[in-house]
Amino acid sequence: MSAESHPTLPPVRLHSDAELARDALGAPLFARAVRLARWAGPATRVGVGGELAAEQLPAAAAHLGLDAGDEDAAGYASQAWRVAVDTGLVDVTEPEEDTDAEGAGEAGGEPHGTAAPGEDLALVTGGAPGDVLGLWRAALETVLADTAVPDLEDLVDALDAGGEIAFDRLDWNPGREADFLDEVLANLYLLTVAEGGASERPIPLPVLAASMVVPDGMGEPTDAVLEQVSDAMMRLDDQFRQLEPIGLVEFRPVDEELMAQADEDVPRGEREVDDEDVSRYGMVRLTPLGLYGIRARMLEAGVAAPAVGELAGKGADALLDAVSSYPEHAAQAEIEQWMAGREPADAVAELLAAARGDDEGGPLRRLRCQQALALAGPDAEPAVRSVLDEAELGGLARVWLAEHGAADVPAPAPEMVFWLTVDTIAAQLAADGETEELPLLMETLTAHHTGFFDQVWRVEHPSTVQVLEAMGRLHPDRKTAKEARKAAFKARSRRP
């Protein structure tokens, strides 16, 4: 992934750092890591890799309040300890290989090291929210690395005689698995922010799996592709089960009955499943903390992943340039935050100055400028009136003044009307493409101007030809569409 000059993703709505830090501290796995860090002391024994000694796992599990009868309790304690070590919540002194008998463990004479609370543990209660989030992100990286590793049983089966992992037997490539997981989370992030910046709706697991497997442009998936989607769902089901305890996602696993049918190799057509109940196939949602974490990883990878509000301290030129590529709702949210911190009159003057320009992006900048001006009150009238005589902004200014009931608004010259019409349609084409609503807009803008196409081809606007060609394709009246095509030909002919 590489950085782009313009955002490639819609902006995300993030919670405040304080709210996110509270969520991080409440994530079950992170909370367990903190508790074990406070539990660590002189009697805590660790192995060569810093792992908690096996004989200490029952005590660690008990400290965490885990059920001693749960066969997974020791595994949960071991994972929490590993997170605590990797994040710096715990400092370990690993044993030396030739440790004498005095430093050896009681069970089998194995050497052991020691552990103590790390300096970073103090950040949990005494640090800023950003410090807590930094610790959580380190914990997330540990969990992501673990999630990309196959099951222990598969690893044991793949050990060769020399004790090395035979990756060809395992059909597992560490780099490929990490890339797969990154792509899964990127797709989940995109599906989330595309719904409005921070969707509350969970994503069905089949939808996410299909986004990983089904080729772009494929119509009805083949049986082979559907089988790949099913396999991807099972893979994702396992991965999201591991990612939920760190607070990255909320996850509803695949129904056990469906998994049993899959294990029994029951044909798809014979499975007793209500296809309407898609939730049985698994549902996943990035939490607010998860959105923050995945965006942070994307930024580190050089991906343009904007967040609503990050333009509030920048100039109007940066605002209009950025929100030109945002969806309507996201642009509105960003503009509102930008306007909130400024004096209305000064903000409007700055916006109007930034909206000027005969470049290709000008129409969409002016559309977003008009969207921003709608938030301004009567204090903005002097700044708006100051551009009434400008070809690029005069039409926009008249629209604002009329909507606010201003008096003594001069009528626009015909040339300005034609220019504004071209600019408006060009902006809509740039924002949304050829939508179903665009023909109606074209009809509305041309209906009240006799001889419109006899004049509009002369308009000195960089998008005149493009707009007339679009009108020739889309105008609902066939006769008018033909006139638009003739005008487009004239406009092309008069330009080098």
Image (cartoon, rainbow, N blue to C red):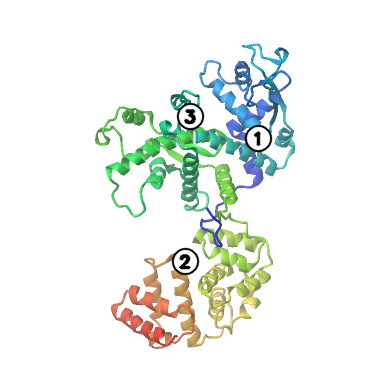
Q: Which mark is residue 388?
A: none
Q: Considering the image in quadrants, where does the C terminus appear?
A: bottom left
Percent coordinates x, y for residue 100 in the rendering: 71, 15
Q: Please, what is the three-letter code of the amino acid marked with disc 2?
A: Ala
Gap between marks 2 and 1, in whole Å?
44 Å
In the displayed structure, 460 sits above or below 466; it is below
Where disc 1 sits, the SS reads helix
Q: Please, what is the three-letter code of the amino acid marked with disc 3?
A: Ile
| Residue designated by label 3 | 165
Q: Please, what is the three-letter code of the amino acid marked with disc 1?
A: Thr
Where disc 2 sits, the SS reads helix
Q: Nearer the viewer, mark 3 or mark 1?
A: 3
Gap between marks 2 and 3, in whole Å?
52 Å
Say which label, 2 or 1, has the lower sequence index.
Answer: 1
| Residue designated by label 2 | 431
Marks 2 & 1, CB-CB < 8 Å contact:
no
Question: Disc count in the image?
Answer: 3
In the rendered image, the residue lying farthest to the front is 162
Choose top left, top right, bottom left or bottom right for residue 224: top left
| Residue designated by label 1 | 87
Choose top left, top right, bottom left or bottom right for residue 466: bottom left
Gap between marks 3 and 1, in whole Å?
27 Å
